[in-house]
């Protein structure tokens, strides 16, 4: 089930970036600027990322780690960049496929069929991994969680920038362990209309079936005016049988459908950017919190997003950017009052921010900002059954947060220095101060990084509501990376990390009382390392990466513990290997194999004689995938892809990363996938 970013870009750990559209994106977004010169980072004459050499890709620029474009080898973070070309070569079906080959990531299941990711052995589901689309946070605001299975549209993505590490000093309380920043295609890179349809077959059942439409246009009558939009409607199903610990079961097909609908429209005029998103995602579920539900429940995650910002040039080296953002969501909604999972609440966030970017000297950059946001939530139905609860004795609740941040970047011949901090005060849980410092250096073919950061997780609305008083999590992370270009066609990098989380906020479910609870535990964390080796030739690319973590001496949280083995945490393998490659066969035809091997995992896999869940060990799982891509088939702009995921039909089981008593959720297994797409300039 795990696809792969071909490799032009999981040519990553720090590589790739602005991709073949680096020149177009820099011109359209003004985002790719060289820190020393202030000029756009352009690759003249390059319109296809496959024309780029390995050195070109390593020297392209990203801004996810600092909000100031720097090369991936200089940027103050452990960064992976996945290009559009990688996604298409891979034939990826959803973000789970795309992120599967990123070092450190592994999937897990929460409740009610929701699948998300862990990073470096830590469960990142509720407010610990920030997902952004063009700078717009997408985490739902009640529990702060993500839902990644067949959710967001891949066809409109230009590139994905991932920080494999903390980002709270810039992004706040959802960026505790990682940041996933999705950058969609702009009007210049699209410059026309694109349509695509994907169909997957799992045994005799439909697997992934998605359709998308995108357009981009610039105005000849009004200079600097552009618009871009996209629409994705989809469906995904699974197969196999889900069994709870009492012996009850149900067939996954028809009871675990995932149906996304996602639309985005963005308009830009000079420094003004306005975007609107409609996200209507739904899941059919019978697994609930573990025991098989009597009837299939239809669960909705609806979100409405409006974002506006305006870059005001106050001088040649000074820019002021006000931003306003509105989010309205109805997540985890089940409106049937007869369902044991009945739940319907609305949450809104109103954000206002101001950022100042200043280059006082050639090699110095200063970023300062302030933002405030107001969270408002209310019950849509006052019937208190299932999982519906009051906010104390009220039907609504309100929280306010104010934050300020600052960052200084200095380029020096000895090393590049990054220093910054963020202070955020939440009206219910108090303040969090998180500093960071980084030293990076590129010396010819060699680069090195030393990073020290603190981060935090801000509790969500329901985290606070379902607790007896929470403190924010506080995280300290130390990282180091070294990389070396081995000739013109090879690159190797290794990074090490040490993560300590104090007062982790962990979800618990009382099966007897059918109540949810959040509380702070003492401490958890992991340490480990990640290796990445890549090769790139004009007609062939390849990568292998290895991830390792251990929790030995780091974890005091029983909810994550595996009895008798303190080096591992629930659900996530201590060892993971990912391999991928791309071979151009003939005039636009390429063959793209990949493999992801998860080491042994531990989770609640069986029950004792009294029906109580017990922890078991799952054997290593090897997922093998193959995708063929044919570009410009018969006519320019027409593409045909055909692939097989999980060739050996291993059916990866999604394990629950905490002691919630949820049995493994069966993965889809072997799937045959075909994609047809056409793009035409207007």
Image (spheres, rainbow, N blue to C red):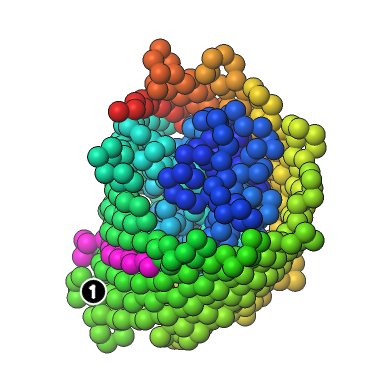
Please tell me which residue is depicted at 63% across the width and 39% down the height of the picture: 57
Q: Is residue 164 above or below residue 553?
A: above
Quarter assignment of residue 240:
top left
Q: Position of residue 198 (x, y in %)?
A: 38, 31
Quarter assignment of residue 324:
bottom left
Please tell me which residue is depicted at 32% across the width and 32% down the height of the picture: 192
Q: Is residue 509 left or right of residue 561?
A: left
Q: Position of residue 540 (x, y in %)?
A: 66, 25
Does the magenta stretch mainly form a helix, a strand or a loop?
strand
Q: Quadrant of the C terminus?
A: top left
Q: Is residue 602 above or below residue 351?
A: above
Read off the magenta span.
322-338
Quarter assignment of residue 422:
bottom right
Q: Position of residue 36 (x, y in %)?
A: 64, 55
Q: Nearer the viewer, residue 344 or 530?
A: 530
Q: Is residue 672 above or below residue 250?
A: above
* The magenta stretch spans residue 325: yes
Taking the image as drawn, is residue 140 in sight? Answer: no
Please tell me which residue is depicted at 46% across the width and 24% down the height of the picture: 641
* The magenta stretch spans residue 435: no
Q: Secondary structure at mark 1?
A: strand
Q: Is residue 171 left or right of residue 248?
A: right
Q: Nearer the viewer, residue 12 or 149?
A: 12
Total count of labels:
1
Please tell me which residue is depicted at 58% across the width and 29% down the height of the picture: 50
Q: Position of residue 349 (x, y in %)?
A: 32, 70
Taking the image as drawn, is residue 153 in sight? Answer: yes
Judge the density around disc 1: few (<14), some (14-19), many (≥20) Cα neighbours within 10 Å: many
Q: Nearer the viewer, residue 266 or 232?
A: 266
Q: Is residue 16 left or right of residue 368?
A: right
Badge 1 is on which residue?
Answer: 379
């Amino acid at each position: 089930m795990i696809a792969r970013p071909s490799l032009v870009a999981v040519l990553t750990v720090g590589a790739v970036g602005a991709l073949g559209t680096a020149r177009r994106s820099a011109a359209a977004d003004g985002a790719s600027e060289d820190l020393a010169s202030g000029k756009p980072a352009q690759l003249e004459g390059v319109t296809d990322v496959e024309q780029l050499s390995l050195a070109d890709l390593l020297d392209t620029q990203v801004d996810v780690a600092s909000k100031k474009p720097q090369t991936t080898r200089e940027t103050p973070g452990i960064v992976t960049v996945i290009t559009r070309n990688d996604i298409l070569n891979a034939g990826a079906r959803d973000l789970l496929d795309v992120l599967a080959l990123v070092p450190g990531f592994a999937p897990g299941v929460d409740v009610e069929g929701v699948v998300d990711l862990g990073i470096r052995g830590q469960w990142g589901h509720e407010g610990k991994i920030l997902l952004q689309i063009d700078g717009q946070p997408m985490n739902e605001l009640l529990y702060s969680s993500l839902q990644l299975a067949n959710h967001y549209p891949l066809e409109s993505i230009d590139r994905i920038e991932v920080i494999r590490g903390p980002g709270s000093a810039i992004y706040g309380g959802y960026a505790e362990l990682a940041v996933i920043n999705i950058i969609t295609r702009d009007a210049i890179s699209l410059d026309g209309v694109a349509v695509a349809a994907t169909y997957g077959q799992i045994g005799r059942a439909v697997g992934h079936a998605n359709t998308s439409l995108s357009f981009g246009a610039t105005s000849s009558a009004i200079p600097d005016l552009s618009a871009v939009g996209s629409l994705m409607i989809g469906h995904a199903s699974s197969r196999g049988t889900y069994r709870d610990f009492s012996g009850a079961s149900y067939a996954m097909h028809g009871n675990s459908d995932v149906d996304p609908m996602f639309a985005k429209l963005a308009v830009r005029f000079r420094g003004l950017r306005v975007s609107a998103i409609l996200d209507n995602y739904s899941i059919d579920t019978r697994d609930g919190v573990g025991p098989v539900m009597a009837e299939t429940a239809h669960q909705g995650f609806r979100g409405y997003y409006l974002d506006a910002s305006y870059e005001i040039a106050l001088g040649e080296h000074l820019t002021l950017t006000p931003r306003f953002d509105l989010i309205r969501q109805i997540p985890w909604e089940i409106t049937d009052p007869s369902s044991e999972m009945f739940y319907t609440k609305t949450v809104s966030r109103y954000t206002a921010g101001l950022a100042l970017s200043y280059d006082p000297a050639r090699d110095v950059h200063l970023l300062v900002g302030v933002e405030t946001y107001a969270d408002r939530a209310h019950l849509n139905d006052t019937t208190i059954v299932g999982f519906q609860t009051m906010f104390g004795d009220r039907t609504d609740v309100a929280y306010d947060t104010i934050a300020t941040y600052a960052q200084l970047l200095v380029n020096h011949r000895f090393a590049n220095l990054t220093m910054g901090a963020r202070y955020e005060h939440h009206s219910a849980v108090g303040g969090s101060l998180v500093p960071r410092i980084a030293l990076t250096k590129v010396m010819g073919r060699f680069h090195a990084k030393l990073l020290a950061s603190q981060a935090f997780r801000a509790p969500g609305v329901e985290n606070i509501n379902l607790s007896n008083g929470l403190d924010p999590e506080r995280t300290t992370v130390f990282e180091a990376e070294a990389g070396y270009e081995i000739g013109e066609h090879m690159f190797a990098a290794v990074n090490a990390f040490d993560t300590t989380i104090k007062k982790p906020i962990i979800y618990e479910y009382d099966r007897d009382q059918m109540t949810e609870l959040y509380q702070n535990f003492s401490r958890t964390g992991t340490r480990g390392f990640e290796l990445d080796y890549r090769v790139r030739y004009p007609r062939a690319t390849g990568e292998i990466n290895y991830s390792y973590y251990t929790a030995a001496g780091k974890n005091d949280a029983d909810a994550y513990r595996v009895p008798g083995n303190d080096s591992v945490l629930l659900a996530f393998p201590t060892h993971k290997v990912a391999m991928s490659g791309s071979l151009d066969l003939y005039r636009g035809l390429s063959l793209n194999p990949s493999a992801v091997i998860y080491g042994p995992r531990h989770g609640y896999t069986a029950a004792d004689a009294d029906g109580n869940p017990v922890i078991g060990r799952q054997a290593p799982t090897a997922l093998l995938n193959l995708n063929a891509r044919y570009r410009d088939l018969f006519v320019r702009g027409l593409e045909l892809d055909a692939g097989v995921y999980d060739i050996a039909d291993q059916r990866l089981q999604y394990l629950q990363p905490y002691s919630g008593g949820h049995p493994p959720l069966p993965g889809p297994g072997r799937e045959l996938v075909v994609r047809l797409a056409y793009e035409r300039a207007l």
